Amino acid sequence: MRSVSLFLWGLAPLLASAQLTGRVGPLKSAVEKAANKTCNVLDYGAVADLSTDIGQPLLDAFEDCNGGGLVYVPEGEYALSTWVLFDKGESWALQLDGVIYRNGTDGGNMITFEHTSDFEMFSSNGKGAIQALGYEFRNAGESTNTRIMRLQKVSSFSVHDIILVDSPAFHMSLDTVSDGEVYNVVVRGGSSGGLDGIDVWGENVWIHDVSLLTLNAWERICLLTIHRSKSLIRMSV
């Protein structure tokens, strides 16, 4: 096994010519999953008032729609006070059409998807976003490892048409993932160090049509690839 660490600022054209080793993305469409079952977080106690914690409603909706359904966050502004772990997901989707604001100060990942397959996270209106308000920590001179989102041990997935804003630390981490696609994603962060746009460790992942704004040039995309047989990561930014 050989590990290669690359900072991809200026190297995207080289990697864009690579070939994927198989299909990428979810196995079933979000339309199919929504038709099977849709779980609207408003029916689980979420309130778009910028103060009510959306954490537990997200988990409760996931519990009901995991295994073939779609969790729906309608337009509106929501607060996230407790971090969310979506664990052991199978054949489900998260449709984020509203904006989630960080309202807690814990470290770690605000939203984590773990041990999941056939998964899609997307916005149908192009307005779905997570605003982590990282400037509050920086203005206060406080150090934190709070990150927006992490996908760990996830396969056959896609993340698209969402916006990630001002993470106190990393914005999106893909850890030990495979057969995935990330596209039409906007990451807007600060200009200091430690604010990586997208971190990738995986196999057969295609990242393309991504906008990375105002981030430290060397930390826009950090790519760590473990090469196994003919697996690779293809990127175009």
Image: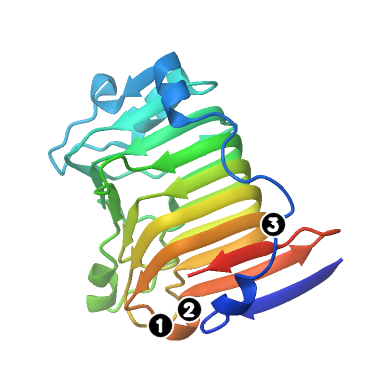
Q: CA distance from mark 2 to mark 3?
A: 24 Å
Instruction: Residue at 60%, 70% (x, y): give it.
Output: 16
Q: Amino acid at mark 3?
A: Leu
Q: Position of residue 216 (x, y in %)?
A: 40, 83
Instruction: Residue at 46%, 75% (x, y): give it.
Output: 220
Residue 195, which numbered label?
none
Q: Position of residue 38 (x, y in %)?
A: 37, 20
Residue tagged 1: 216
Q: Are marks 2 and 3 in contact (CB under 8 Å)?
A: no
- Determine whether, in the image, residue 229 is placed left or right of residue 27: right
Q: Amino acid at mark 2?
A: Glu
Looking at the image, is mark 2 or mark 3 nearer the viewer? 3
Question: Which is more N-terminal, label 3 or label 1?
Answer: 3
Question: Which is more N-terminal, label 3 or label 2?
Answer: 3
- Determine whether, in the image, residue 137 is placed left or right of residue 148: left
Q: Which secondary structure, mark 1? A: loop
Instruction: Residue at 28%, 36% (x, y): give it.
Output: 54
Q: Are marks 2 and 1 in contact (CB under 8 Å)?
A: yes
- Determine whether, in the image, residue 109 is placed left or right of residue 214: right
Q: CA distance from mark 1 to mark 3?
A: 28 Å
Relative vertical location of residue 90 with respect to residue 116 in this rendering, above or below: above
Residue 219, which numbered label?
2
Q: Position of residue 178 (x, y in %)?
A: 67, 49
Residue tagged 3: 20
Instruction: Residue at 24%, 49% (x, y): give it.
Output: 127
